[in-house]
Structures are given as C-alpha cells and as structure tokens.
C-alpha cells in the first residue's frame, strides 16, 4: 500500500471516529435532557420512544441507502425541543432544528 493510500485510510478512520464521538455526545445530551424533572414526558420518552425511533431509523436508512449517521442524529433529536421545553411542543419540528444548530 502506498503512503498516500495509508493516509487516506487513516483520514477515513479518523472521520468515522469523529462521527461516532459526535453521535455519542448527542446521545448523552438527549438522554440527559430526558432524565431532567422538567421533561414533561418523563424518562420513558428516552427508553420507550427515542431509542426505538433510532433503531428503526437506522434500519430504514440501511435499506434505502441513506446516510445512517445523519439519520441517527435526526432520530435522536427529533423530539428534543419539546423535551427541553414543553412549550415547544406544537412547533418542535422547527424549534428542534434551531436547537440542533446550537448543539
């Protein structure tokens, strides 16, 4: 393998690691928000809803050749706005996008 190929492989591996770290950090942020007493829905929204949505979103992403990492991030954040503030519930789909930018 040429040194250029080695560098390209390392860059791909580094990028994959960064993406995994980003997803893990987002997962922690969302789960911690679910644990807070201010979460109207209770911790069950994490254990019974979000984790299930993530699982099925990744499955659908694989079957449709979508970017699994992007889909997983979207699944993790899809209800985040209403979790952090119930007043965001009616517009959580747009407010969630704004909060995702802040993360």
Image (tube, rainbow, N blue to C red):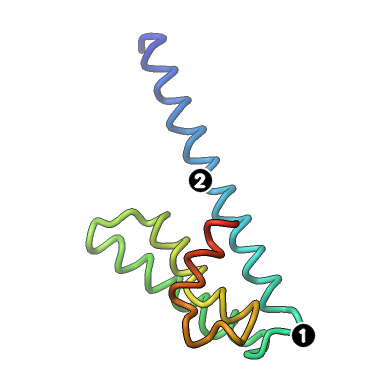
Mark 1–mark 2 Cα distance, whole angstroms, equals: 30 Å
Q: Position of residue 32 (x, y in %)?
A: 71, 70
Q: Position of residue 4 (x, y in %)?
A: 38, 12
User: At 67% across and 78% down in the image, what residue appears?
Assistant: 34
Q: Compare residues 62 and 28 and report the one nearer the observer.
A: 28
- Dot placed on the residue nearer the N-terminal end, 1 or 2: 2
Q: Which secondary structure lies at badge 2?
A: helix
Q: Compare residues 36 and 90 and report the one nearer the observer.
A: 90
User: At 42% across and 17% down in the image, what residue appears?
Assistant: 6
Q: Position of residue 79 (x, y in %)?
A: 51, 77
Image-quadrant location for residue 23: bottom right
Q: Local crowd at mark 1 within 10 Å, few (<14), some, or many (≥20)?
A: few
Measured along the vertical axis of the image, is residue 102 above or below residue 16? below
Q: Is residue 77 left or right of residue 86?
A: left
Quadrant of the rendering where the N terminus is positioned: top left
| Mark drawn on residue 37 | 1
Measured along the vertical axis of the image, is residue 66 above or below residue 93? above
Instruction: Report the residue marked by disc 2.
Output: 19
User: At 47% across and 81% down in the image, what residue appears?
Assistant: 91
Q: Compare residues 94 and 21 and report the one nearer the observer.
A: 94
């Amino acid at each position: 393998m040429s040194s250029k190929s080695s560098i390209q492989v390392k860059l791909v591996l580094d990028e994959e690691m960064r993406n995994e770290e980003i997803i893990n950090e987002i997962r922690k942020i969302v789960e911690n928000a679910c644990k807070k007493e201010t979460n109207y829905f209770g911790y069950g929204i994490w254990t019974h809803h979000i984790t299930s949505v993530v699982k099925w979103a990744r499955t659908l992403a694989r079957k449709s050749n979508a970017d699994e990492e992007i889909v997983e991030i979207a699944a993790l954040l899809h209800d985040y706005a209403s979790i952090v503030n119930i007043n965001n519930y009616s517009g959580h789909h747009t407010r969630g996008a704004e909060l995702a930018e802040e993360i």
